Amino acid sequence: MSDHCATVIGAGLAGCEAAWQLAQQGISVKLIEMKPVVQTPAHHTDQYAELVCSNSFRGERLSSAVGLLKAELRCMNSLIMQCADHNRVPAGDALAVDRDGFSEQITEIIKSHPLISVETREACEIPNGPVIIATGPLTSPSMTETIRQLPGLDTLNFYDAAAPIVVRESLDESRMYRLSRYGRGDDYLNCPMTETEYNCFIDALLSAETAEVHGFEEKNVFDGCMPIESMARRGRMVPAFGPMKPVGLSDPGTGKEPFAVVQLRQDDAGETMYNIVGFQTRLKFNEQKRVFGLIPGLENAVYARYGVMHRNTFLKSPGFLNERFEMIRRPQCYFAGQITGVEGYVESTASGLVAGRSLASQLHGNDPVPLPGFTATGALGRYVSTPNRNFQPMNCTFGIIDPLPVVPGQKKIRDKQARYEAISERALNYIKSISD
């Protein structure tokens, strides 16, 4: 048993990462998780780190900010990244996982760690002492009310949605072709649409019945998870320039680019289920079957999971949290995950890693030093702690990472991809230097 101990509330991605980081640095951890005693509208299993939306951790290339963030986390011994890499399924340039295998592996590792003890119950109060609150965007009403009473805090809400998952054997693959965008492999099933098929689909989508979501307003939808029907309401062609864009997906049989394309991504290691990419929705279940049945190849699709929408809660973190995700008015009380205003699986993981490492450092008597803003991880912490009149959930982007310095006499890198790769190289060199 360690001389130091801490509590982590919530066994999602951020909570598991935080508990792991603490335990790996010799801190005894009490991990409190409310499932299965209390479930949320979005969760379906009793496993930890359950992926409730997509099974994709997004792009891997170092010319993307989330690719850099994943590379940084790997350098810093992230449990989530280790398990994601171990449970990888084909997804072109993206990292996608078998969601069940991924969660099961993390659950086993957390439960078997000698310094982590698990309590299965709903946490309604914030305990005294060192604590990391990683209750997620679906924090229970009682804990939400407890958090709301904390000094210097406003809580905010937005709406999130999940895409449907279909059973592969129910698909008509003769109407599809395999290809990743821009010829980068063949990991996706593609359903091509003619202009007539597309317009018929959009007409059905716009007239379909949606499920009621309490307090739902279109303006409160997070753009990164916008329901497909909300996109169509913004303009008939919006989906064709979004998840249904045909660019880089010419049909190998004809050599021609279709008018629109719906992509399906493998969702499990056995390749028995596929996720309809970018098709988050709040359509009623029977309407999903009817409308999405207009997509070529999905006429008789069997749904392993229908799309759903739910309300998420996040903190107005600037002025409340510092760049290490620690409460400004209560030292050694941290928040981590999407509740802090970071958006995405990898970003949530990063916040848990930072919170866990920072708290461990404090408990060992050291003053934790935040990562610099020229790293993706450090830039996320800076984003959630910097005053912002319209603070909203944020994915990792190069826009929040420090640009390359201007060096007199040295030419500026004008090619965007090369510039982003140089930013990534600078960040990784630093992360590696402090991780050795």
Image (cartoon, rainbow, N blue to C red):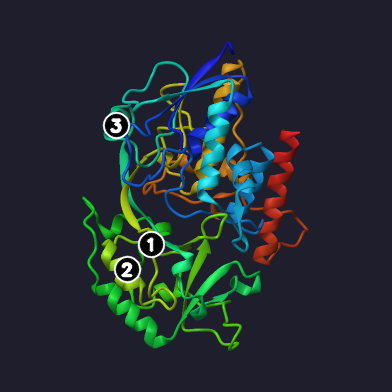
Counting from the top left corner in percent of width and height, residue 276 is at 44, 65
Question: What amino acid is at disc 3?
Answer: Arg
Q: Earlier in the sequence, mark 2 or mark 3?
A: 3
Counting from the top left corner in percent of width and height, residue 71 is at 66, 47
Q: Quadrant of the C terminus?
A: top right
Q: Which mark is residue 303?
A: 1
Q: Quadrant of residue 339?
A: top left
Question: What amino acid is at disc 1?
Answer: Tyr
Q: Secondary structure at mark 2?
A: helix
Q: Secondary structure at mark 1?
A: strand
User: Taking 28 as reference, is 86 left or right?
Assistant: right
Q: Quadrant of the N terminus?
A: top right
Q: Residue at x 34, y 30 (%)?
A: 152
The CA span between labels 2 and 1 is: 8 Å
Residue under pointer 3 = 148
Between 306 and 422, the one lying in front of the other is 306
Residue closest to the far top = 3
Between 270 and 7, the one lying in front of the other is 270
Residue under pointer 2 = 289
Counting from the top left corner in percent of width and height, residue 255 is at 60, 87
User: Taking 122 as reference, is 181 left or right?
Assistant: right
Question: What amino acid is at disc 2?
Answer: Lys
The CA span between labels 2 and 3 is: 39 Å
Q: Is residue 26 above or below residue 233?
A: above
**Which is in the foreground here, disc 1 or disc 3?**
1
**Label 1 packing within 10 angstroms: few (<14), some (14-19), many (20+):** some
Q: Secondary structure at mark 3?
A: helix
Counting from the top left corner in percent of width and height, residue 140 is at 31, 35
Between 20 and 223, the one lying in front of the other is 20
